Amino acid sequence: TKSTPSLAVPDPASRSNPDGVHGASAVVDPRTYSWRFPDWTGRTWPEAIIYELHIGAFTAEGSFTAAAQRLPDLAQLGITALQLMPLGAFPGKRNWGYDGVLQFAPAACYGSPEDLKSFIDAAHGLGMMVLLDVVYNHFGPEGNYLHAYCPEFFSAVSTPWGPAINFDGNHSIAVRDFFVHNALYWIEEYRFDGLRLDAVHAMQDRSDPNIVCEIARALRQGPGRTRRVHLVLENNGNQARYLERDAKGRPLLATAQWDDDIHHALHVLTSGEADGYYADYAVKPVEKLGRALAEGFAYQGERSEFRDRKRGEPSIQLPPAAFVAFLQNHDMVGNRAQGERIHSLADPHLLNAAYACLLLAPEVPMLFMGEEFDASTPFLFFCDFAAEVAQAVADGRRREFQRFAAFAEESACAHIPDPNEESSFAASQLDWTERDEPEHQGRLLWIKDLLTLRQRYLAPHLAGIAHGGRYRTDGGVMGAQWKLANRALWTIVAHFGSEPAKIVLPPGDMVYVIRALGTADSSVRLEPGAVLVTYKSG
């Protein structure tokens, strides 16, 4: 009889795979690292000013150790939270992280498990939280051996990235436990301060409670009892149900959600682009921005023409801190064919106004690495797959862009960088020498000034805001107002139109945090790109 060939596979819960995802797992003693700041218990969520980064592209060295050396610069800027793109071991030497196949093993190309702990320790010593992006909706296309010996781990449902995880079928209890334990593992063993769940809208689960709720409850009933542990979602369905608070304003499940509506509206207003998913925001973009800033979502059940269905749930009952706002993130930059950053696309005057809206609104703001100094380096999609998979990924990316008008012709797609070429990764690594150059200092100083104003006037009164605010638009002028925890009124007025406008201010004493050109005590002239921010005692 013929013998069955054997297959050597890594431990699916390996803590370390130093020779890559196809190699042997290493035994790691989690007790050997001595924490320098063992009493760190985190920070409150309204204090968060997030900085998203990719460990491999954040520095030229691309390691945990090199990244730690840049943290004092971020702390001095005013950053209070870091969010790391996924770290689970992936095939090859470079990857965004969303193709991970060993969920418990930090990618060896960045350093050892102890190097990661040292990075987190350094951040805590500077007063910064550290969150980790985790991918529980699919495994990468290469190096996933679970298919070979545990096909029950996957369902027959497919996602845009491969077979869905079996969260609700036969044998799903063990699968659910695997991911719940993984979430707890990063918080307990590495002392991360929270997680960002990637694409929960793609997690197919009909259970009650579903896996998102189960993970949220495990974190709150476990490490969340003695530390501040935060759970952030990516959910393009705008489902407010995950963000509800109890009578004391504490999150029942998730702490916050990435708010694409704010990004899309600001992107359309500053760049004029209206292709693809931006088409939904090309109609009344100022109104959509106002509603998103004041109420959380711009789409709260209205029909999305791009998606050809209704989208979202009411969100004004939620506090602003339930939403993470941004002008850039890894997707919004990296999913562009050339990885361009917003400053290369936008009107500079309108972009200044956009940053004021981003950093001085009560939502939790997030910057993407290099954004603070208008980094000239793009952030391209990059990976390092074996030949057959590599070609499929490159071909698929070109087909994806053919949906956009600029790439309708096949010849245009030929100029899209190949994700598998090492040059795509090298081009995406930040050049930190730019930070000190005069042409980059303007953005850095503007963002630092805005964060200083946020810390002085707004941050002390964010905790305790119970619900959203109100907004008003007039042509290209957007005004949004919130009642802070101390009952003071916080107002942002921004002009995204093309012609000067005049607004009349209500009577009463107020502090002008940012003041536009005033023509009289009660009348203010707004040039395009002008912003007015006021604080009025309650």
Image (cartoon, grey):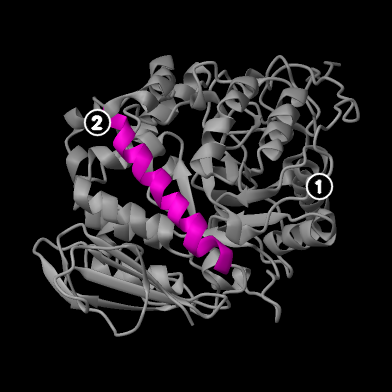
Examine the structure image and report whether residue 446 is included in the region drawn in magenta: yes
Residue 339 appears in view: no
Give whichever of 295, 95 is nearer the camera. Answer: 295
Q: Is residue 121 left or right of residue 490?
A: right
Q: Residue at x 49, y 64 (%)?
A: 458
Q: Residue at x 80, y 37 (%)?
A: 37
* Vertical placement of residue 137 versus 459, above or below: above
Q: Which residue is mark 2?
A: 413
Q: CA distance from mark 2 to mark 1?
A: 42 Å
Q: Residue at x 10, y 60 (%)?
A: 498
Give whichever of 374, 7 is nearer the camera. Answer: 374
- The magenta-colored residue range is 439-462
Quarter where residue 250 is shown:
bottom right
Residue 423 screen position, x and y as percent: 39, 16
Q: Residue at x 74, y 21 (%)?
A: 17
Examine the structure image and report whether residue 139 is included in the region drawn in magenta: no
Q: Amino acid at mark 1?
A: His
